[in-house]
Amino acid sequence: MLNDVIFGQYYPQKSFVHRMDPRAKIVLMIAYIVAIFLANNFYGLAAVVLFLIVAVLFSRVPFGSVLRSVKMILFLIVFTAILNLFFYSTENVHLIWQWGILSLSWESVINMIFLALRLFLLVMGTSILTLTTAPVELTDGIESLLKPLKYIKFPVHELALIMSIALRFIPTLMDETNRIIAAQKARGADFETGGLFKRAKAMIPVLIPLLVSAFRRAEELGDAMDARCYSGAKGRTKYKKLTFTWRDLAATFVVAALITGVVLLNIYLGGKFDILYYFL
Amino acid sequence: MEAVRFDNVKFSYRDDGSGFAVNGVSLSIEEGQFVAILGRNGSGKSTLAKLINALIVPTSGTVSVFGMDTADDKKTFEIRKSAGMVFQNPDNQTVASIVEDDVAFGPENIGVPREEIGKRIDFALDAVGMQEFRHSTPAKLSGGQKQRIAIAGVLALMPKIMILDESTAMLDPKGRREVMAVIKKLNREQGITVILITHFMDEALQADRAIVMHRGEVVMDGAPEEIFSRSDELEMYNLTLPRAAYICKKLQAAGMPVANAFTAEELAEAICASLQKG
């Protein structure tokens, strides 16, 4: 289950987006998020949607996989949307219904649609990053991007190593968890019945052995790393080199065009409620 | 040349220095040798391994690797570079999620230039026969394959000595055979000194020399055939004979005139010979 959340995300493929430098992908993803929040009318969001479709086509990841990532936070989107629908208030509202502090107006409907759309685009866009970048590449990219922080003594290399070891141990610890659960079940432990509290309590005999074994593994791993001459970042070389290629440059231009486009649409085509006032 | 030397080495895990895990060991291992260290649990054989790699330093006495004292901090890196160590659990010695990245870990640590690391990965993966898995993830490999990757990870440091601390203990028979074949090949073809710590007697038969540890001391030392012909002594140290040797001994005890044999093949031949005679 957890395996799917972390590793099932990556969709191995040899596409334009897959071959991009992970650093470029991370930075461009941040720029993409900025574009989403810059857009203050539906035309701007339409531009973002257009960009997203192009990006998915270039990544050669099926649209279904991209949509699946939204499924996980669908509840969150619906929840925020409903809250916004009833608690949104602004001046010159065209009220539809009101009861105490709860109100429903045409503005809040538009706002809700706008917000939900933003969240959808946000999740789908960021999932392109995780779908096309292997976890190892991601940590390499993050390490490289955080490099300037070294000058303020921030342990960049250590942080990246911790992240990659954590990723590396997830399948191992998942296997172990399943084994412990099986062992406890064989001794009559009950994980399926009872309320939330009782079931959470039933997990204690699983978590304690898991924790103990994780510590033992950590100690052995430490020895194994020592034996392989590990001594921190000093004097260390890196085998994999990240290179910025024409793909990254091209993608940067496209994202720059997207942001410019969104800003121009903001300036020339007004706010998100314009559609509403056109009809009312 | 002498690869490893122990001079009256004692080691205690306790601060007060009581209860020696290794108690007065002196021995010398020549370069190119394939040595098996045998002993039951708690005999001090794993401690012996860690002493060679400078993971621990002796409480008293000295351990030296190619003349370098393991107690000398400045030499720790050189020692670890020349004496690589493979541990028991393959899952706990892999640092990366991709095979080639894991093999690259050692060379990266000692600052090998990038192009050279690539060559070393090629060499190490070829040596253990895992080249085709270069881009796979260790989590998806079998135990024997994972352990071969761990060996490749050590091999990429170009060590002259390879210490295997019960590295076959957690493997199934197939994985054990794979790993043993790789070790033997490294010893024969690369001239790497192998120190194999094990409690599988059959594995010890493949070595040039077997050392038996008991309660922190070296109690037997010699050619495996010689050690295994002293079965009464072995029994005292709670060790058993290799299976074929055991059957051979039982046959002899039952009055069948078979020659001494230690492996299945030898035993088969001995039985054939004795049948032809009779």
Image (cartoon, coloured by chain):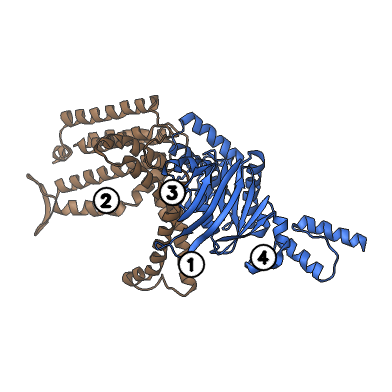
Chain colours: A brown, B blue
**SS state under label 1:** helix
Q: Which mark is residue A182?
A: 1
Which residue type carries mark 1? Answer: Ala
Q: Which residue is mark 3?
A: A168
Chain letter of the residue beneath label 1 in the structure image: A
**Subunit of mark 3?**
A
The residue lying toward the viewer, choosing from A10 and A36, is A10
Please determine if labels 3 and 2 lie on a single subunit: yes
Residue A125: % across, % down: 32, 40
Q: Quadrant of residue A10?
A: top left
Mark 1 and mark 2 lie on one chain; the one further toward the N terminus is 2
Is B177 situated above or below B233?
A: above
Residue A65: x percent and y percent? Answer: 41, 45
The residue positioned 42% from the left and 65% from the top of the image is A209
Q: Amino acid at mark 4?
A: Leu
Dot placed on the residue nearer the N-terminal end, 1 or 3: 3
Q: Locate residue B40: give its quadrant.
A: bottom right
Nearer-the-camera pick, A65 or B239: B239
**How far separated are the C-alphas under marks 1 and 3?**
23 Å
Mark toward the viewer: 1 or 3 = 3
Disc 3/disc 2 C-alpha distance (Å): 31 Å
Residue B278 position (above or below residue B128):
below
Q: Which residue bears the numbered disc 4?
A: B234
Taking the image as shown, residue B260 lies to the left or right of residue B197, namely right
Residue type marked 2 = Ile
Marks 1 & 2 on one chain: yes
Element under disc 2: helix
- Of pointers 3 and 2, the one earlier in the residue sequence: 2
Q: Residue at x 69, y 59 (%)?
A: B227
Which amino acid is tagged 3? Answer: Arg
- Residue named by callout 2: A77
Assess disc 4: are there few (<14), some (14-19) or many (≥20) residues with their C-alpha within 10 Å of its C-alpha: some
